[in-house]
Amino acid sequence: MLVLAFDTATAAITVALYEWSPGERVRRRGSVENIDRRRHTELLTPSIAEVMAEAGAAPGDLSAIAVGVGPGPYTGLRVGLVTARAMGEALRIPVHGVCTLDVIAWASRRTEPFAVATDARRKEVYWARYETARQRSDGPSVTPPAEVPDDLPVIGEGVALYPDVLGRPDHEPEPLLPSAGALAELVVARLSGAPGPELLPPEPLYLRRPDAREPGPRKKVTPR
């Protein structure tokens, strides 16, 4: 079983291809990581092609697609979800969505309570509370950084952006961004029956209205 995973909900355009057979370990076949807040559209498709070429795989070899559903800025998030849905429909394979905060939490492998915070722009963060790396207990929410509970260690890019508020003494905030490798491993674990975060439909997890909106009707000009 080949699982193609990618996430574009943050500054990371991350793509990975993992192979899994029941009863065997998950094996990475290829991966690409780019950090760019503005070029999700330009970078995602070439990254997918690069990963597939690295693995010597064709689209028809894929068994499933895993995609991060956010929360995240509207434009970048939409790129990944539109691509995932289009590929799933064209190849007739399932597409599994995962909360991007869950992906970061999963990669941390933490066993004690903590929070994940990522950049929500507008001087806010997307954040959620976790009991362990596999269990979210609250959120996701979007608030100013000061509203993230101060009794928890915090990981994720939010700490790097607001260290005076979210930083904790003697605590490393890694990982800062999601990785497609962790996303693929999470989905494979859930498909094999292991406990973990809920798999979601490939729909955007928006916590507020997008910045870009449809223009309204033109106002009539009344002659004087």
Image (cartoon, rainbow, N blue to C red):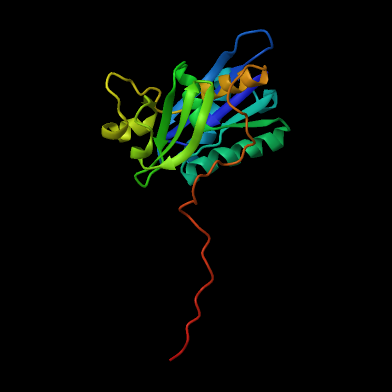
Residue nearest the observer in this picture, 23 or 198? 198
Q: Residue at x 50, y 58 (%)?
A: 213
Q: Position of residue 200 (x, y in %)?
A: 63, 33
Quarter holding residue 169: top left
Residue 48 vs residue 113, the one in the foreground: 113
Q: Position of residue 34 (x, y in %)?
A: 43, 30
Q: Nearer the viewer, residue 105 or 184?
A: 105
- Visible residue check, residue 54: yes
Q: Is residue 176 above or below residue 71?
A: above
Q: Is residue 188 above or below residue 91?
A: above
Q: Nearer the viewer, residue 4 or 77?
A: 77
Residue 48 is drawn in which quadrant? top right
Q: Quadrant of residue 168?
A: top left
Residue that lies at the very extreme toward the bottom in this rendered image: 224
Q: Locate residue 111, reporting x and y percent.
A: 47, 15
Quarter of the image where the N terminus is located: top right
Asked if residue 99 lies left or right of residue 122, the reply is right
| Residue 179 in sight here | no
Q: Quadrant of the C terminus?
A: bottom left
Q: Is residue 111 left or right of residue 185?
A: left
Residue 133: percent from the left, percent from the top? 49, 20
- The residue drawn where x is 54% and y is 21% is 134
Residue sitting at the far top: 24
Residue in view at x 61 percent, y 36 percent: 84
Is 12 positioned to the left or the right of 21 in the image? left
- Outermost residue, front direction? 151
